[in-house]
Image: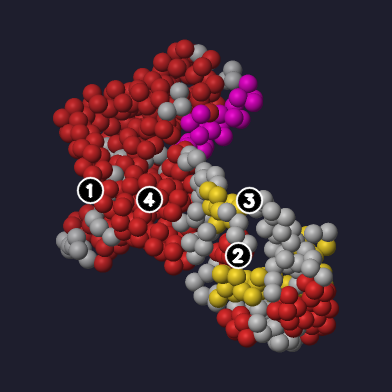
């Protein structure tokens, strides 16, 4: 348990702070660390010495079993506790190269964990102190519960979607710039700096997925996991984009979260120490530092990069099959998938099936055919139903208000498709019209091989979508059929 604390926090680093720099002295009250006084460093020096003498007395009386020091002043303000620790022989752990050296010269009994602060974080320091003391006392280290959480693909894909959309929109605008250059009689070139910007924006997507996956899986995502994620993501981003690398990114996030921070827990013992409680708390082995996190990232990155050679051909086959179907049976494929998109969304399969397939299509920076179906079969169908409700003279005021809000969000932001479900479930003909609208719009999109995405204003697909005419016709049909049916049935 926590016995006493003497910790001085300053608004500046102590190496740069002057005597009149604002600071706060932390001490211990009722076994809890809390701020004791505030003032300038000069004003607090006396209080620091008094607190340090109190800690020294507790050490001499045997009420403290260990001492943790963090950039202390063993020849000045912390002289009393330093001498008491050296005389009593209690184990000492800590960081701060200069202060550690002075304590060793005074004869302090250092446990296995001590040294400078370079390549460490606050978390890795605290963990190393706990492990050093546990090893010093010979406490058995038992493997505890997993250091990872269950992965939620829903939140993972939602977290990654902005990066995929940004890359796809940027690549679409670059294609428009190339087209404009061709119309004006000059060529921008496929290997120029502008093309390179788009290329690099796409190559970073697997690393984004890896980082988000690691953040979702890690119990505590800090600098350690961040460094390992960036290192591992660099391996996936170092080669040409390939469909399926984002799947490798999910696997890499799992590897980094497992190898970057391994948890251990000692047998419960009642041990009193100054500054940090270690009674029945979780501990980690001293692999949780920045150099080791880099090695964790390298190992995870190499495994993911190797795995991509096995995974990418499988997902490339999916993309090739989809493109073959579009080129040869586009209208039929769009008709079937458009109707199924409405059904899948209503039964909760959007985030588990449709969105992952959309992101796979967008992994190379292109727009998605399934993303276009998302826009027309879900967003525009919902907008059509809500528009019909909003303009119908017999609609209740509350329904009109809700429908107008949903219509605005769908048309401006390409989202909030659930707003139409109550009206669809109320009337079987509106339900059928929603499926027919999605299927007819999908057939038109498939016939023209139109590609796009939801989560953007619907009109923007005329600019960033592939085949703007197909996008326009598909969205118009998907909107009109449920709109007219809603007007008739209400």
Of the numbered discs 4 and 3, the one sitting upstream in the chain is 4
Above-or-below relation of 246 to 408 = below
Mark positioned earlier in the residue sequence (4 or 2) = 2
Q: Which part of the image, by quadrant, shows the N terminus?
A: bottom right
Q: Which residue is mark 4?
A: 252
What is the span of residues highlighted in magenta in the rendered image?
396-418
Q: Residues within 10 Å of mark 2 (few under 14, many from 20)?
A: some
Numbered disc 1: secondary structure: helix
- State how far apart marks 4 and 3 are (Cα): 33 Å
Residue 482: x and y, percent?
A: 43, 22
Q: Is residue 130 visible?
A: no
In this rendering, is residue 166 above or below 344? below
Quadrant of the rendered structure where residue 394 is?
Answer: top right
Tag 1 residue:
309
Q: Secondary structure at mark 2?
A: helix
Q: What's the mark number on residue 136?
A: 2
- In the figure, is residue 487 to the left or right of 334? right
Q: Which residue is mark 3?
A: 267
């Amino acid at each position: 348990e926590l016995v006493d604390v003497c910790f001085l926090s300053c608004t500046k680093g102590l190496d740069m702070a002057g005597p009149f720099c604002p600071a706060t002295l932390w001490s211990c009250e009722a076994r809890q660390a809390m701020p004791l006084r505030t003032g300038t460093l000069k004003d607090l020096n006396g209080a620091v010495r008094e607190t340090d003498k109190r800690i020294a007395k507790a050490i001499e009386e045997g009420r403290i079993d260990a001492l943790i020091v963090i950039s202390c002043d063993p020849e000045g303000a912390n002289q009393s506790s330093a001498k008491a620790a050296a005389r009593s022989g209690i184990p000492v752990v800590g960081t701060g190269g200069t202060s550690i050296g002075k304590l060793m010269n005074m004869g302090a009994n250092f446990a296995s964990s001590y040294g400078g602060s370079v390549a460490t974080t606050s978390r890795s320091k605290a963990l190393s102190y706990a492990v050093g003391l546990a090893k010093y006392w010979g406490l058995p280290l038992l493997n505890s519960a997993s250091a990872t959480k269950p992965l939620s693909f829903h939140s993972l894909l939602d977290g990654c979607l902005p990066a995929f959309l940004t890359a796809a929109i940027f690549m679409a605008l670059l294609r428009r710039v190339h087209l404009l250059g061709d119309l004006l009689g000059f060529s921008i070139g496929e290997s120029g700096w502008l093309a390179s910007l788009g290329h690099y924006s796409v190559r970073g997507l697997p690393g984004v997925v890896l980082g988000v996956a690691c953040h979702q899986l890690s119990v505590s995502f800090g600098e350690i996991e961040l460094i390992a994620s960036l290192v591992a993501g660099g391996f996936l981003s170092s080669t040409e984009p390939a469909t399926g690398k984002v799947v490798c990114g999910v696997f890499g996030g799992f590897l980094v979260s497992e190898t970057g921070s391994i948890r251990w827990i000692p047998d419960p013992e009642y041990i009193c120490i100054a500054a940090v409680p270690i009674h029945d708390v979780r501990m980690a082995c001293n692999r949780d530092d920045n150099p080791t996190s880099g090695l964790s990232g390298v190992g995870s990155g190499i495994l993911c990069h190797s795995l991509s050679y096995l995974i990418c051909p499988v997902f490339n086959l999916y993309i090739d099959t989809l493109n073959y179907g579009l080129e040869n049976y586009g209208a039929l494929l769009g008709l079937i998938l458009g109707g199924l998109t409405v059904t899948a969304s209503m039964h909760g399969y959007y985030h588990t099936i449709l969105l992952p397939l959309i992101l796979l299509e967008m992994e190379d920076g292109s727009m998605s055919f399934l993303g276009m179906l998302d826009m027309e079969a879900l967003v525009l169908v919902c907008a059509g139903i809500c528009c019909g409700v909003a303009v119908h003279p017999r609609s209740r005021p509350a329904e009109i208000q809700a429908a107008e809000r949903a219509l605005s969000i769908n048309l401006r932001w390409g989202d909030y498709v659930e707003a139409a479900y109550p009206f669809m479930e109320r009337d079987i003909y509106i339900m059928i019209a929603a499926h027919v609208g999605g299927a007819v719009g999908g057939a038109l999109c498939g016939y023209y091989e139109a590609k796009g995405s939801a989560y953007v204003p619907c009109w923007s697909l005329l600019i960033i979508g592939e085949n703007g005419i197909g996008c326009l016709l598909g969205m118009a049909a998907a909107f009109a059929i449920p709109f007219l049916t809603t007007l008739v049935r209400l």
